[in-house]
Image (spheres, helix red, strand yellow):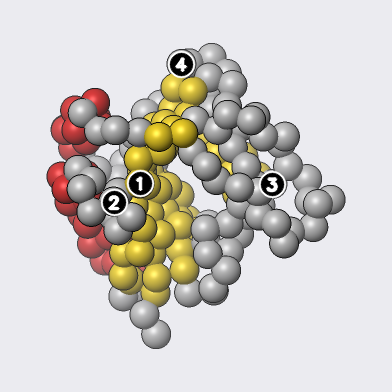
Amino acid sequence: MKIYKDFFPSYIYEIILKYLEKTPFVIDPTPLAQDIDKSVPRLTPTSYQGFIHQSFPQDPHSNLSLNFFAGMALIKIKNEEKKIFNLERVLFNYLTKGTVGQLHYDAKEDNAYTFILNLTDGDGGTQVNNKFYKNNFNEGLLFKSNILHQGIGPTEGLYRQNMALILREQQ
């Protein structure tokens, strides 16, 4: 697990959030990872998990400007990690107050990484390997995609937004 603090200059977030205001979201359909040991400790998910915008490559008509910011994040991570990554997926998550997502992993392969960039501040967060990481504005989490994790909505604020990328390391 690597935590990136102050990931983008603050004005970038203002632009991203303006684009997100005009972006369609759908109810998040993420299922529980079926092949996990059911005794793994986890928070019980709510039946409603919040909203997502599936951007690259799932939606060819997605907001291309949002994909641009995902590309900027990819370049920064490549430079920091000194590794060659390809961008496999871009999602934007919107979790409302009291939402608990399903425990899942994003990929089974060992060369896939998940990067979650918090676009807002609040008391929600991401639980990774049964450890809670608070949703701090402009902070990113990078971890192997085959690690179980789940999104947690805020209990005090109204919502939490993040950008979630899946990166594949080239060997």
The mark that comes first in sequence, 2 or 3, is 2
Marks 2 & 3, CB-CB < 8 Å contact: no
Real-space Cα separation, disc 2 to disc 1, in angstroms: 6 Å
The mark that comes first in sequence, 3 or 1, is 1
Looking at the picture, which amino acid does disc 2 mark? Asp
Real-space Cα separation, disc 4 to disc 3, in angstroms: 24 Å
The mark that comes first in sequence, 4 or 1, is 1
User: Which residue is pictured at 29% across the width and 33% down the height?
Assistant: 24
Q: Mark 1 points at which residue?
A: 54
Real-space Cα separation, disc 3 to disc 1, in angstroms: 26 Å
Q: Mark 3 points at which residue?
A: 130
Q: Nearer the viewer, residue 4 or 158?
A: 158
Q: Mark 4 points at which residue?
A: 158
Q: Which of marks 4 and 1 is in front?
A: 1
Looking at the picture, which amino acid does disc 4 mark? Leu
Marks 2 & 1, CB-CB < 8 Å contact: yes
